[in-house]
Amino acid sequence: MIKDMVKSTMLSVGIAFMIFCLAGIAYDVAYKGNFTFEDYHFTKMVIGCVVVGLGFGVPSVVYSKEDLPMLIKVIIHMGIGCIVYTATAYAVGWIGEGKTFAQGLMVIAIQLAVAFLIWFFFMLHFRKEAKEMNERIQQMK
């Protein structure tokens, strides 16, 4: 269980860094190469990225609990992850700084949609993997 949690956490942190880098490229292009940071803002964002990865990775251990319904597992996992993301986004300035309320809501909506899209693709992957394992078990009988 610890090994699975470490693995999923490392994967989540990696995905968070990938999204962070892609967003950084988009902002750099949008600002025509004048995308700058001051007062350790970049460092704060990198730390925030790790926190977000942990926020989605650690709670994924709930999927190993077979006695919980899937809906409850998703609510626990994504609820914790999305709360951690939102708090971190405000803390490091991904949301809020110089943005209108509507822009902040739009950023939150996009990020939550991305989080659920990533979750959905992982769910499809693991469902396919389980189906293949069940088929192999049936063939062995």
Image: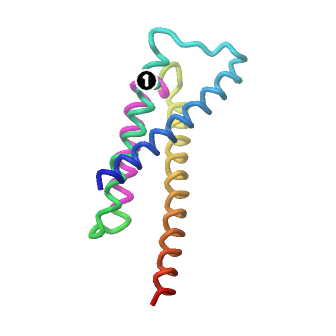
Give the residue drawn at x 45%, y 9%: 39
Q: Which of 111 and 40 is in front in this view?
A: 40
Q: Give the range drawn in magenta.
A: 73-95
Q: Residues within 10 Å of mark 1 (few under 14, many from 20)?
A: some
Give the residue drawn at x 54%, y 47%: 113
Residue 25 found in image quarter: top right
Q: Which of 30 and 51 is in front in this view?
A: 51
**Farthest left residue in view:** 67
Q: In this view, does 79 lie above or below 42?
A: below
Q: Which of 50 and 68 is in front in this view?
A: 50
- Residue 134: x and y, percent? 47, 79
**Farthest top residue in view:** 39
Please say whether residue 81 is one of the residues in the magenta stretch: yes
Residue 91 found in image quarter: top left
- Residue 6: x and y, percent? 36, 46
Give the residue drawn at x 38%, y 34%: 51
Residue 55 found in image quarter: top left
Please say whether residue 31 is one of the residues in the magenta stretch: no
Q: Mark 1 points at which residue?
A: 92
